[in-house]
Amino acid sequence: METETETEQLNRFLRKEGADLVGFCSCREYFPEYSSAVVIGVSVLKLLKKSQSDPIQNLNTIMDLLNIQGRQFLCERGFGVWGALFSQEDLPGKDIIPHRELAVKAGLGTIGRNFLVITPEFGPRVQLTTILTTMPVLPSQPLDFAPCVTCTMCVDKCPTGALDSYFRHEECVKCFTCVLECPVGRDAQDLRCYSDLPDIWQSIR
């Protein structure tokens, strides 16, 4: 029987702890002191199903716990690690991790017309957290996945015209129509069960 690599062990560990997506890639172009990035994704609808009463606290707790558990796993094996906690990423003075770019590089999805990561499993309805580490990894293969080539639903339904050939940040009102209307993902049909999802989504972003 083949022995699992440390990358495979970490993948299995994180999924057991609740990660829906796990990808690996190099991150030296962003953070030269670290060799690898571990990108972790969790379905937003799964998070909401766990607790709609306090979605912000629930989201922060789950994403931070995954990040901390992953770092502990790596530390116990002697590797250097760093990763901003999800709940603290908006604090002044914090280094910004380019989650979207790393997620695409790690094979979790592609950048869509709404300029978010579109995953095959959950469309853009996924939260990301990233661990930087000195552990060498076998990089995940980028996805051969292009759902937005013929679809313009998010662009057509954007109420302010913020989505064009580039993201018009000043026009975006954070209504998240582009997230909720995206037809990609096995969770797309489940959205109909959440009439108050736009309000909940705004509260957790």
Image (cartoon, helix red, strand yellow):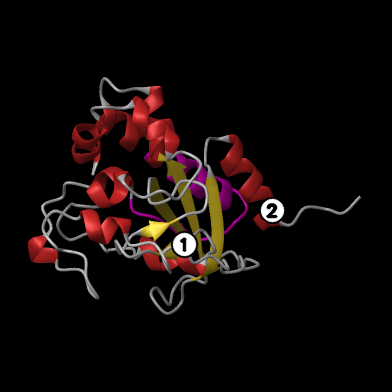
Instruction: Tell me where residue 105 appears, x and y as whole percent.
Output: 49, 69
- The percent coordinates of residue 82 (x first, y second) are 41, 58
Q: From which residue to which does the magenta span run?
A: 64-84
Residue located 68% across and 49% down the image: 9
Q: Amino acid at mark 2?
A: Glu
Quadrant of the image occupied by residue 112:
bottom left
Q: Picture coordinates of residue 129 (x, y %)?
A: 40, 51
Q: Which residue is at a point 22% across and 53% down the rendered structure image?
A: 157
Classify residue 77 as left or right of residue 29.
Answer: right
What is the residue that sits farthest to the right in this orientation?
1
Q: In this figure, which residue is indicated by the disc labeled 2?
A: 8
User: In this view, which residue lies farthest toward the top?
Assistant: 53
Three-letter code for the amino acid on which mark 1 is drawn: Pro
- Mark 2 secondary-structure assignment: helix
Residue 139 among those drawn in magenta: no
Left or right: where does residue 5 sit relative to residue 112? Answer: right
